[in-house]
Image: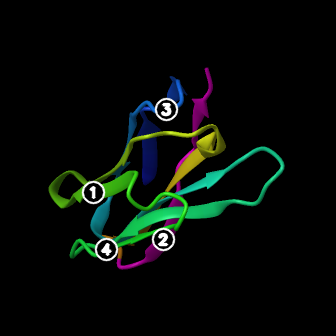
Amino acid sequence: QVQLVESGGGLVQPGGSLRLSCAASGSIFSISSMGWYRQASGKQRELVATITSGGSTNYADSVKGRFTISRDNAKHTVYLQMNSLKPEDTAVYYCNAHLALITASRLNLWGQGTQVTVSS
């Protein structure tokens, strides 16, 4: 069973920080792109940040300079460090990964989501 397990969400005051983690497990051969997306209530899911296996990153304009994505390839884990959080960052955050399995099949996998609430 291949899965992504997220952790690190919660309630934080404006200006605070949170760190999200997402670990992939199962019969994984390699992972190319990993990323974080978010979906606020009543809105469409949107890209937050992505990172390739080589470390190239891409960020939404709304989070540039505040969020940092990183990954540990040996642990099949991606992180999202979120600083200077704003109320508009409130959303369910989803991890995504493009996997190559040991069976040679490929999979675009999503995590279950973790709630981030920024409020005083």
Q: CA distance from mark 1 to mark 3?
A: 17 Å
**Residue 21, horizontal then vertical, whole percent:** 36, 42
Residue lying furthest top? 120
Under mark 1, the amino acid is: Ser
Q: CA distance from mark 4 to mark 1?
A: 9 Å
The local crowd at label 3, few if under 14, some if 14 to 19, many if 20 or more residues have their Cα within 10 Å, is some
Under mark 2, the amino acid is: Leu
Q: Is residue 31 visible?
A: yes
Question: Which residue is identified by label 4?
Answer: 52
Judged left or right of residue 49, residue 86 is right
Question: Which residue is identified by label 2?
Answer: 107
Identify the residue shown where x is 58% and y is 43%. Answer: 113
**Residue 61, horizontal then vertical, whole percent:** 52, 67
Q: CA distance from mark 3 to mark 2?
A: 25 Å
**Residue 79, horizontal then vertical, whole percent:** 33, 49
Q: Are marks 3 and 4 in contact (CB under 8 Å)?
A: no
Where is 48 relative to 89, above or below?
Answer: below
| Sequence-first tag of 4 and 2 | 4
| Sequence-first tag of 3 and 2 | 3
| The one of 50 and 24 positioned closer to us in this rendering | 50
Q: CA distance from mark 2 to mark 1?
A: 21 Å
Q: CA distance from mark 4 to mark 2?
A: 16 Å
Under mark 4, the amino acid is: Thr
Question: Which residue is identified by label 1?
Answer: 70
